[in-house]
Image (cartoon, coloured by chain):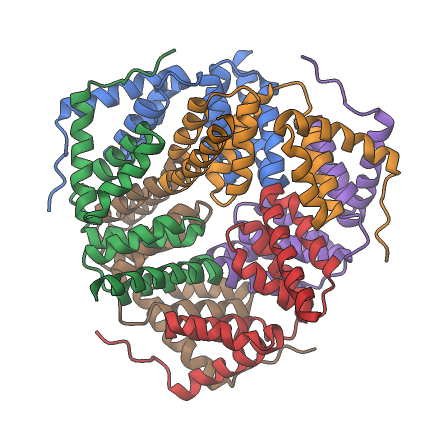
Chain colours: A blue, B orange, C red, D purple, E green, F brown
Amino acid sequence: MNSKPILEESEKSALYQKGMEELHKQLGSSADEYIKQLKSISEEFAWVNVAFPFGELYSRNILDLKTRELCTIAALTVQGFALPQLKLHIRAAIRCGASRPEVAEVITQMTAYCGFPAATNALLIMKDVFADESKQEE
Amino acid sequence: MNSKPILEESEKSALYQKGMEELHKQLGSSADEYIKQLKSISEEFAWVNVAFPFGELYSRNILDLKTRELCTIAALTVQGFALPQLKLHIRAAIRCGASRPEVAEVITQMTAYCGFPAATNALLIMKDVFADESKQEE
Amino acid sequence: MNSKPILEESEKSALYQKGMEELHKQLGSSADEYIKQLKSISEEFAWVNVAFPFGELYSRNILDLKTRELCTIAALTVQGFALPQLKLHIRAAIRCGASRPEVAEVITQMTAYCGFPAATNALLIMKDVFADESKQEE
Amino acid sequence: MNSKPILEESEKSALYQKGMEELHKQLGSSADEYIKQLKSISEEFAWVNVAFPFGELYSRNILDLKTRELCTIAALTVQGFALPQLKLHIRAAIRCGASRPEVAEVITQMTAYCGFPAATNALLIMKDVFADESKQEE
Amino acid sequence: MNSKPILEESEKSALYQKGMEELHKQLGSSADEYIKQLKSISEEFAWVNVAFPFGELYSRNILDLKTRELCTIAALTVQGFALPQLKLHIRAAIRCGASRPEVAEVITQMTAYCGFPAATNALLIMKDVFADESKQEE
Amino acid sequence: MNSKPILEESEKSALYQKGMEELHKQLGSSADEYIKQLKSISEEFAWVNVAFPFGELYSRNILDLKTRELCTIAALTVQGFALPQLKLHIRAAIRCGASRPEVAEVITQMTAYCGFPAATNALLIMKDVFADESKQEE
């Protein structure tokens, strides 16, 4: 058995390139670092992570990025275990035009769907992100 | 031990009344039926369900209702087990100004956060809601 | 490869017999039907289900059965997907001395830990169980 | 848009005050610290957390606090991700009269409903809480 | 805003075609019906479902399909809510060379990781699949 | 109430002894340390953890241990919160003959069933395990 790529490199890189553009829009300069970390674990996983959610799902012009990011924050809040990803997407939401109170409001609203523990842990992560960003702005 | 209400009825009904107004905005005429069903199970649960998420969380003027409903759809999609509530909130999202493609887009985006099975089941529910609504419009 | 039992039958049946006694305490006459259904799927699974939770976990004299059943109802409520098992354990809780309002109270309390959708679905199941039992008492 | 409180302050503070009393019963002197932390993140969230689960759900006289806390431990164990909250409620259970073996027994029983990984992680947290408390008693 | 496809059709259809080949290997003649159902809900979702898991993830030559399907059965069992998808993948596992006792064994093993309720519900689904297949073979 | 063992010691230890043999096959020399940690928390929990999954479930000769471990990795990946246990079972999978790319492949495949956040966190754990093992081999 081998693990030869199933698509021509050119085809795969079209999706990948589109995904990296999208990722930069959302994460700014931390996009490269994020992908570098994933690549150090698995080239395949890095490729699908860029190509599929960012090259395909997020790049469709049906919802604006701010709304998409708030929906992702809702999803990661109720899941409860995805706190590193929540950190990333709170930053992305702010970059895409969400205000801090809007981010806090989505997480608070989730209390009705996931209860207090998951929402509390998400708010603690949010507090860290905001504190980090305030420090960097100084 | 008794289970006497801990707040004066007047105080409790202020939150409740606010919640019912909010619930009508979102669910329209089906709000009454929804609460009637809950009351037939537990008066206490019906009260907290109206007073807390609708009287308090949803009624704060920080996010518009359409964004709130899309975030709720995101949350219920990734949880996977809350299909009756998803049905309710897809209807509410449409009432609050979301288009059908926007609802489909949020659920499709969730694939990246919950995988295909949960997203597929959410889309099947969405299809049922849209079919029901199309039938009623005829 | 074969699947020869790893313990002497005599030893295994000691755990199993203890488990069936415990199961009868909790489920009454429906215990036999429950195990018969499991056996029709998998003898192995029926054995571990009787021997492990009922022969071992539930039979330790540290908590009374009513408290154990209320804790199980709490667990199954927050999981959201285990509604057939919730039905079984609501019946068991009643058999073990819990009142109907106590069962409703545990589920309602869970709202704070799992949100409204999971708690609502659990209350709907509870309502069915209580309606069934009221019918049988007539 | 503004976010003016929807109820008169006097009404809201009735629920809040009731909730703080309840919280002190359960958490003792650490209640104030807990709420201070939440307030530093979001005044709104702190309010709903005190008013709703503690002012409303826990304060109803249908179940004794020890049983309530054991049910909450069951719920947080099976969720798997809510370990900080589990710590808090293990302390609360002990304050409300549960013995250490009873707390261990509820978590062990949960193995049947959530498997070994979630139960193991809960027991490790429990061990930390008991070690902390033993140290303070010295 | 429009939702123009982000890749040339030719590129996208390479991934899609590869995915459909893979899907046929796993599901046989029911692959077409499955995709037809998805397309009736959302063309976009049907495309990503074929292209991503089947065109990309499953088609890499690192694990044999039988092992992949058993891993998927493990995953869907512990999630608890994905019973329609479990049905599909139990059929796929059998097509890919797994024996019935092997499928039952994976689900039974999962009891240690997800508890009895999720495993019981998965075994009930498995029983249905096996009964259906036995009927068709007659 | 007392907590006298429900089975004769001799019977209980047959299951336990079988489980410890199995555990050594999978975890090697770290099996003793693992059980010692569990015993320091709860003798009962350590007993059921050895006796039930290892003495009973894993020791049946229907699936080879490598396949079993890959299925467990799949399960722990989609659960999202069981990262310490995932670490243990990645080590066990390697001991039972799985290659590093096979472990990475199972986790990557899970993306389709649990989304990217859970799979990313699992891959980060895997990277740590592989780095630890590479260091020990030097």
Whether residue F134 is situated above or below residue B102 in the rendered picture: below
Of the pair F93 and C17, the residue shown nearer to us: C17
- Residue extending furthest toward the bottom: C10
Please count the marks in the image: 0
Please tell me in which quadrant of the rendered image residue F33 appears: bottom left
How far from the left and from the top, in percent, is residue F112?
33, 40
Does any portion of residue C63 appear in the rendered image?
no
Instruction: Describe residue A1's horizontal placement relative to residue A48 as left or right.
Output: left
How far from the left and from the top, in percent, is residue B74?
49, 32
Picture residue at 18% right of the left edge, 42% below the top? E22
Whether residue A96 is situated above or below residue E108 in the rendered picture: above
Does any portion of residue E67 appear in the rendered image?
yes
- Residue extending furthest toward the front: B138
Instruction: Describe residue B128's horizontal placement relative to residue D128 as left or right.
Output: left
* Quadrant including the N terminus of chain F: bottom right
Picture residue at 71% right of the left edge, 35% below the top? B50
Instruction: Describe residue A62's horizontal placement relative to residue A17 as left or right.
Output: right
Of the pair C53 and C25, the residue shown nearer to us: C25
How far from the left and from the top, in percent, is residue A78?
53, 37
Instruction: Describe residue E31's horizontal placement relative to residue D94 as left or right.
Output: left
How far from the left and from the top, in percent, is residue C86?
57, 59
Picture residue at 31% right of the left edge, 38% below the top? E37
Picture residue at 37% right of the left edge, 55% below the top? F88
Whether residue E80 is situated above or below residue F51 in the rendered picture: above
Whether residue D126 is situated above or below residue B109 in the rendered picture: below
